[in-house]
Image: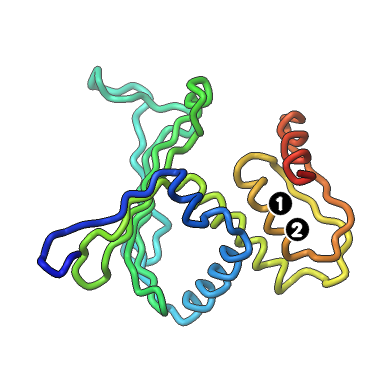
């Protein structure tokens, strides 16, 4: 919010997010490590009765009564995932996504995500962001934190199951943290996806 009371916020499309550093996996792992520390002190709030719900889902009936209403289908839903995070961040926000497996036939991701951030005191919007990369890299960073604390330092073999968006981001995180790895194994039910990830990692 500006000093004269006007509400203003950043709009960041996917390229803006890339330019801002969303693909910096090492920094993402570091931030997720910080977030786990904040969660351990319970300096956070989410939705639901217990203030700990992962989100609220809108789904559809198999046979809608209304002609214009979407029908149920594989992975077809909308989901709102609000939260407040304290610590040094002290910010509120919500990840919102729509999901439909049929999106693949339209050359679109199964889930299409956006994220908005709000001032924790006033509720004023701070940013509205494209969030597919943000969500994938955040998710991939979590196993990176796990490797940092739980893996044997001399581990030589690393593996991922699934070579889609999450598998790809996880692979990058694992390679950054498993510093002595010599062999990387990839499995996906679609072998071509494994090949694509292999080539990306080699590059």
Q: Is residue 70 left or right of residue 190?
A: left
Q: Nearer the viewer, residue 59 or 173?
A: 173
Task: Check disc 2 and report its element: helix, strand or loop.
Answer: helix
Depth order, front residue of 178/20: 20
Kindly identify which numbered label has been placed on residue 175: 2
Position of the N terminus by quadrant:
bottom left
Q: Which mark is residue 61?
A: none
Q: Mark 1 highlights which residue?
A: 171
Q: Residue at x 16, y 59 (%)?
A: 7
Residue at image coords 10%, 67%: 4
Residue farthest along the top direction in this orientation: 67
Q: Where does the image place residue 33, in percent across and percent down from the top left? A: 58, 72
Left or right? Give the position of 45 relative to 187: left
Q: Is residue 195 above or below residue 15?
A: above
Q: Position of residue 53 (x, y in %)?
A: 39, 60
Looking at the picture, does residue 53 appear above or below residue 100? below
> Residue at horizontal 85%, vertical 60%?
181
Q: Could you say whether the residue bearing mark 1 is in a helix, strand or loop?
A: helix
Indicate the quadrant containing the C terminus: top left, top right, bottom left or bottom right.
top right
């Amino acid at each position: 919010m500006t000093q004269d009371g006007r509400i203003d916020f950043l709009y960041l499309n996917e390229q803006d997010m890339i330019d801002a550093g969303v693909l910096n996996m090492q920094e993402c792992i570091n931030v997720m490590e910080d977030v786990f520390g904040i969660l351990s002190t319970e300096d956070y709030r989410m939705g639901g009765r217990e203030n700990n719900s992962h989100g609220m889902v809108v789904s559809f009936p198999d046979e809608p009564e209304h002609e214009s209403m979407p029908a149920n289908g594989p992975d077809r839903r909308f989901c709102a995932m609000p939260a407040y995070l304290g610590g040094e961040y002290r910010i509120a926000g919500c990840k919102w996504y729509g999901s439909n497996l049929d999106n693949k036939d339209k050359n679109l991701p199964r889930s299409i995500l956006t994220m908005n951030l709000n001032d924790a005191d006033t509720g004023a919007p701070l940013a509205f962001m494209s969030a597919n990369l943000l969500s994938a890299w955040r998710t991939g960073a979590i196993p990176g934190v796990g490797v940092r604390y739980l893996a044997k330092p001399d581990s030589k073999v690393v593996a991922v199951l699934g070579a889609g968006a999450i598998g790809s981001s996880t692979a990058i995180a694992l390679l950054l943290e498993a510093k002595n790895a010599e062999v990387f194994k990839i499995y996906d039910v679609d072998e071509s996806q494994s090949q694509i990830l292999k080539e990306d990692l080699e590059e």
